[in-house]
Amino acid sequence: MKAIMVMFDSLNRRMLEPYGCDWVHTPNFSRLAERTACFDTSYVGSMPCMPARREIHTGRYNFLHRSWGPIEPFDDSMPEILKEHGIYTHLVSDHYHYWEEGGCNYHTRYSSWEIARGQEGEPWKGDLRPFDIPETLNGQGGRWGRQDWVNRRYLQREAQMPQPMTFGMGEEFLRTNSGEDNWFLHIETFDPHEPYFAAERFRELYPQASQGIHFDWPPYRRVQETPEQVERCRHESAALHSMCDFYMGRVIDLMDELDLWKDTLLIVNTDHGFLLGEHDWWAKCSMPFYDEVAHTPLFIWDPRCGVRGERRRSLVQTIDLPATLLDYFGVERPADMQGQPLAQTVADDTPAREAALFGLFGAHVNVTDGRYVYMRAPATAENSPINEYTLMPTHMRRTFGTEELQDIRIAEPFAFTKGCRTMQIGARPWTNAHQFGTMLFDLETDPHQEHPIQDAAVEQRMLDHMIRLMRDNDAPAEQYERLGVATAVGA
């Protein structure tokens, strides 16, 4: 048996033709929907990049115990489990956070891996020569922003760009190994993550992407730009989505050419979406996780049932993907993996769960049942108490600072730490979620989440779901206190 996962970063559901978009050119995603089960109610779990990838390995929520960080010593890793059961696992990626301290041991779980470099402000090429950086609206300044423009100087041709390089490495693996058995290929590109650096032929599809001051890197804050500037950035994003669509089409073509549909599972997913001015916000993390961020595209082809061209309404989320892969290869799931295999959901839309939890460490704790979304804010502006629980005290690009490690305590084991006690480190979440308050939305009557509702019965039902899922995940006791809720369902 064989499996391929094609994962994008920040793939925006509302910019894809299969999800109703009529202005972004994504014909290959339409082809993909015709060949797969297309999920209408897929949600994130933990945000953003590496927390989501920890879920893809472990099949359980990350954000209640820890922020960004590596795989923990007690974690179950799906690709490593497959490897231990004789399934060859291979990662190709340009997602540079894998090679930083905060993600430094994810890629080593695979049998082998390859990288393409140069995304965003990755510290790649050392070029100290002076050069003119274009005038850029709200461009990233300082060393990081300059490094991005240094990198672009070495990516002048499309074939040199990280996304084409990544898909080229994936193609090489498929052409080399299509006749072999028992392998899992994970193709992962950082695109269409900002900055929206797309090949020129895709930018030409959107003339508005070249109007006005250069603007392809939106800031993480409220919108302060003019409507025209917002539109320019949206079209820059559209160009990169169209580039992703083209390379997704290459995978579909390869599956046709190499006759892989008959025996190869295909999952196409993303870690989260992105706000491009909706709700008067840019990006993610700073604001509540509206549907533009939390509600994701997902496509699955399972050769065992052969379902194609059908929609699936059942509620699913990121933690289900490792369970689905283990199930496909006939490997037993670890007891700590809480995601559900989606084989039957793909086959006939059998529900996988009643509700799904999602969020960012230290921000709202959110829950949805597919119709309602409940966003529970911290009870106070102090947003406390809250602690990190980890044996790997590492942020995105560095280990915890000495000032953060002055008052380490040792916590008792959690249900999933296999008897290991962890560090308990007081945390200071950088987002101020309390300012937004607790909100309840009815997606059936308000799909754009513009009008929070007041309904005590629905709120209690969603709160019960939230508390039950938190308890199932063995959430730290102080999380309930931080949110101002009792730990008993219905209390």
Image: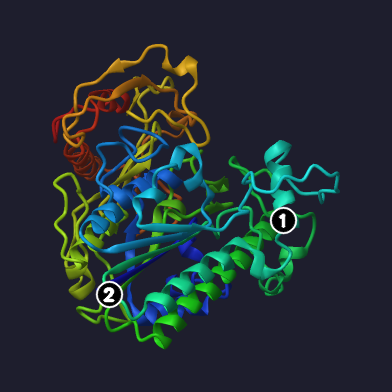
**Labels 2 & 1 near each other (Cβ < 8 A):** no
> Which is nearer the N-term, disc 2 or disc 1?
1
Where on the picture, by quarter, is residue 85? bottom left
- Residue 152 shows which numbered tag? 1
Residue at 27% of width from left, 43% of height from top? Answer: 455
**How far apart in space, not on screen, are marks 2 and 1 (Cα)?**
39 Å
Label 2 Cα neighbours within 10 Å, binned few <14 / some 14-19 / many ≥20? some
Whether residue 226 appears in this view of the structure is no
Where on the picture, by quarter, is residue 34? bottom left
**What quarter of the picture does the C terminus occupy?**
top left
Q: What residue type is disc 2 on?
A: Asp
Percent from the top left, x then y, of residue 199? 68, 68
| Left or right: 465, with 452 as reference point | left
Q: Residue furthest top?
A: 406
Residue at 59% of width from left, 40% of height from top? Answer: 221
| Left or right: 466, with 68 as reference point | left
The residue singled out by tag 2 in the image is: 181
Up-down: is 117 above or below 67? below
